[in-house]
């Protein structure tokens, strides 16, 4: 049992009468170690922030030890529209391995034939031991 879960205070308040419209969605973030970033863990439904925090401690604190848990009401989370694209100001495909096409690989293969590769290795080894 995680340390956080063992520190849960027992809540003796009765549950609200109406569970339907009173339930709100909450987003949960957990922090695994002190000073580490909070990472999205999931979401849950609860009536108020206290209940949301209790549910988050119970659910997300039972699997792994957490240092801290945040719960944020979903209506307060702002996100881009699903059809929005985030544009880069410059093309940086060269940073990704997917940017190397078949043509580029063929050029490198023709450039690095066995003779040139062997001479490169020999010079490289010589420089390493000088």
Image (tube, helix red, strand yellow):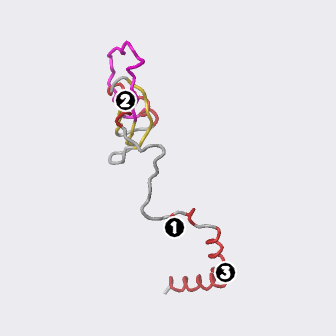
Question: SS for tag 3?
Answer: loop
Image quadrant in which you'd find residue 11: top left
Q: Residue at x 37, y 40 (%)?
A: 78
Q: x, y percentage for residue 88?
A: 44, 59
Image quadrant in which you'd find residue 24: top left
Q: x, y percentage for residue 109?
A: 65, 76
Q: Main secondary structure of the magenta part?
A: loop
Q: Residue at x 51, y 67 (%)?
A: 94
Q: Which residue is mark 2?
A: 6
Q: Which residue is mark 1?
A: 94
- Determine which of the numbered discs, if any, sits on residue 113 in the image: 3
Magenta stretch?
A: 1-27
Q: x, y percentage for residue 69?
A: 36, 37
Q: How crowded is the residue under tag 3: few (<14 C-alpha within 10 Å), some, or many (20+)?
A: few
The front one of 36 and 97 is 97
Vertically, is 95 above or below 35?
below
The front one of 75 and 105 is 75
Q: How crowded is the residue under tag 2: few (<14 C-alpha within 10 Å), some, or many (20+)?
A: few
Query: Does residue 66 show up magenta in the picture?
Result: no
Vertically, is 56 above or below 98?
above
Q: Are marks 1 and 3 in contact (CB under 8 Å)?
A: no
């Amino acid at each position: 049992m995680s340390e956080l879960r063992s520190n849960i205070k027992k809540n003796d308040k009765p549950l609200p009468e109406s569970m339907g419209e009173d339930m709100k969605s909450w987003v949960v973030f957990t922090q695994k170690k002190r000073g580490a970033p909070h990472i999205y863990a999931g979401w849950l439904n609860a009536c108020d922030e206290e209940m949301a925090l209790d549910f988050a401690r119970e659910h997300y604190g039972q699997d792994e030890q957490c240092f801290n848990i945040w719960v944020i009401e979903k209506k307060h989370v702002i996100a881009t529209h699903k059809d929005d694209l985030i544009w880069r100001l410059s093309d940086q495909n060269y940073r990704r391995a997917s940017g190397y096409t078949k043509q580029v690989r063929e050029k490198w293969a023709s450039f690095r034939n066995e003779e040139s590769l062997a001479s490169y290795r020999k010079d490289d080894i010589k420089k390493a031991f000088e």
